[in-house]
């Protein structure tokens, strides 16, 4: 099955392809002007993007919105996770700002959230959710992953998301959980 996806994020594309297995081919949709994300929640943004991009895809398309929510920051960076330090922010910029805001904070509970929306020809079909709890640590650990992964400590494994293998991460991560739900839904069609 060919499934179109609306992302240009190389880290996310690697995770999508790893999750695909032999039965699904994820095809990035390219050459389409970016959809403006105006939602105040991950779900609103995921649905908005899926509906928009599916109008340009010759089949099923999924879009996702995901990010980090830190309790001590009132849920920030939230839907602004990729742009936490500004519109053209790098992962390093975002992580630096996160650590600045948490400088004197002792309790650093956080979660990664992912919402995937599946659509076809401008019509939303289904929405899938994934969430994983962790803690934000002071020093980066690991070389895998992207975004906030080097600072996101996952207690059940005693490692950051940047220290675990991509396969391990897919088994426990917010994105992996949402992708598994979507895979089950597609298999049941």
Image (cartoon, grey):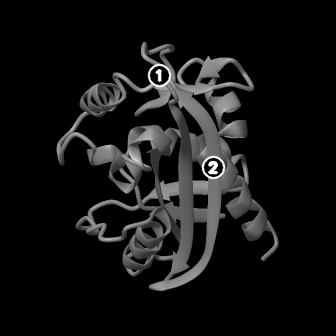
Judge whether 25 appears above or below 54 on screen.
above
Query: Which comes sooner in the sequence, label 2 or label 1?
Result: 2
- What x and y, as percent, mark residue 31? 26, 62
Residue at image x 36%, y 70%?
39
Image side of residue 100 versus residue 3, left or right: left
The residue identified by callout 2 is 131
Tell me the crowding category of disc 2: few under 14, some 14 to 19, or many 20 or more residues within 10 angstroms, Cα based.
some
Tell me the crowding category of disc 1: few under 14, some 14 to 19, or many 20 or more residues within 10 angstroms, Cα based.
many
Residue at image x 26%, y 64%?
34
Q: Are marks 2 and 1 in contact (CB under 8 Å)?
A: no
- What x and y, as percent, mark residue 152? 52, 28
Where on the picture, by quarter, is residue 72? top left
Judging depth in this view, the residue of 12 and 129 nearest the camera is 129
Report the disc number at residue 170: none
Where on the picture, by quarter, is residue 94? top left
Judge whether 40 appears above or below 15 on screen.
below
Image side of residue 87 versus residue 117, left or right: left
Judging depth in this view, the residue of 132 and 30 nearest the camera is 132
- Cα separation, mark 2 vs mark 1, equals 18 Å
Q: Is residue 39 visible?
A: yes
- What x and y, as percent, mark residue 65? 45, 58
Residue at image x 18%, y 48%?
87
Judge whether 131 appears above or below 55 on screen.
above
Judging depth in this view, the residue of 64 and 17 nearest the camera is 64
Judge whether 58 appears above or below 46 on screen.
below
Report the disc number at residue 150: 1
Q: Is residue 164 visible?
A: no
Quadrant of the image containing the C terminus: bottom right
Residue at image x 79%, y 67%?
187
Judging depth in this view, the residue of 167 and 102 nearest the camera is 102
């Amino acid at each position: 099955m060919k499934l179109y996806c609306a992302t240009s994020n190389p880290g996310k594309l690697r995770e999508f392809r790893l999750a695909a297995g032999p039965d699904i081919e994820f095809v990035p949709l390219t050459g389409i002007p970016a959809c403006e994300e105006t939602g105040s929640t991950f779900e609103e943004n995921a649905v908005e993007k899926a509906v928009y991009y599916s109008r340009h895809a010759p089949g099923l398309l999924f879009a996702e919105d995901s990010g980090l929510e830190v309790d001590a920051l009132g849920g920030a960076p939230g839907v602004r996770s990729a742009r936490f330090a500004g519109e053209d922010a790098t992962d390093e910029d975002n992580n630096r700002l996160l650590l600045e805001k948490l400088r004197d904070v002792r309790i650093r509970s956080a979660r990664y959230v992912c919402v995937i929306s599946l659509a076809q020809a401008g019509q939303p079909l289904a929405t899938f959710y994934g969430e994983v709890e962790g803690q934000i640590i002071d020093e980066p650990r690991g070389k895998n992953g992207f975004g906030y992964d080097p600072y996101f400590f996952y207690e059940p494994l005693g490692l950051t998301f940047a220290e675990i293998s991509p396969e391990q991460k897919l088994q426990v991560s917010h994105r992996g959980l949402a992708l598994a739900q979507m895979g089950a839904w597609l298999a049941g069609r």
